[in-house]
Image (spheres, rainbow, N blue to C red):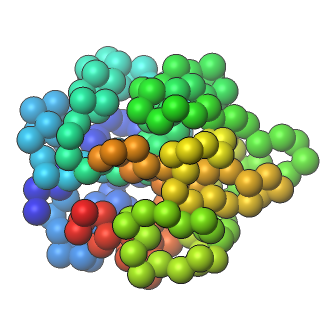
Amino acid sequence: MDLKIIDYGAGNIKSIQFAFQRLGIDAILSSNPEDIISAEKVVFPGVGEASSAMKKLKDSGLDKVIPQLTQPVLGICLGMQLMCNHSEEGNTQGLGIFDVYVKKFNNDVKVPQMGWNVITNLKSELFESINEGDYMYLVHSYYAEICPEAIATTDYQIEYASALQKENFYGVQFHPEKSGLIGEQLLKNFINL
């Protein structure tokens, strides 16, 4: 399996790499557009602040490469948010893969949401052998609004899209690499797409 993890200086990429290693997959870190375009599967991670992460993508030209990919692509956390139209974080224009806006949680809840929460309304082969109400691990202050591309939702005072899909592009707000056996199952499902 030729699986590349996009390395653009804004991701918790080692833990994702180790998670695939536990599944017997040697995922390669790369910022080389040719490597990423030729890969069988691509993971687009992200941890940090949206506008600075987007600047790193633009500086490397990956902002043009990622939306053109035709193989299965999995955006994780900030990676998923950057695949959306726009984020309130730093007033950031995203890649526009998902036609949805990313907003900040209001001050009625503890921000960031940090810890385990349930996923519901599961609608994709990405959730094969994962059940309604299973728990995933989340750390985020911004969320994608409910939209037609939502394939899972989570409730944190408001219901939001915790996973998105459009064609070959998948995005998850939670961290499968930190979500135990359920997260491992999701990564297996991505490998099997």
Q: Is residue 18 above or below residue 46?
A: below
Q: Is residue 16 above or below residue 143?
A: below
Q: Quadrant of residue 14?
A: bottom left
Q: Is residue 103 above or below residue 177?
A: above
Residue 193: image location, x then y, percent? 25, 63
Q: Is residue 143 above or below residue 61?
A: below
- Front-lying residue, 193 or 182: 193
- How many numbered marks does the figure carry? 0
At horizontal 65% and vertical 46% (from top left) the residue drawn is: 146
Where's the N terminus, which quadrant? bottom left
- Front-lying residue, 48 or 119: 119
- Front-lying residue, 34 or 144: 144
Q: Is residue 46 visible?
A: no
At horizontal 35% and vertical 60% (from top left) the residue drawn is: 16
Q: Quadrant of residue 191?
A: bottom left
Q: Residue furthest front?
A: 148
Residue 118: image location, x then y, percent? 65, 71
In this picture, residue 14 sits left or right of residue 91? left
At horizontal 37% and vertical 67% (from top left) the residue drawn is: 125
At horizontal 20% and vertical 40% (from top left) the residue drawn is: 70
Residue 171: image location, x then y, percent? 44, 49
Residue 128: image location, x then y, percent? 39, 75
Q: Quadrant of residue 67?
A: top left
Q: Residue furthest right?
A: 108
Q: Is residue 129 visible?
A: yes
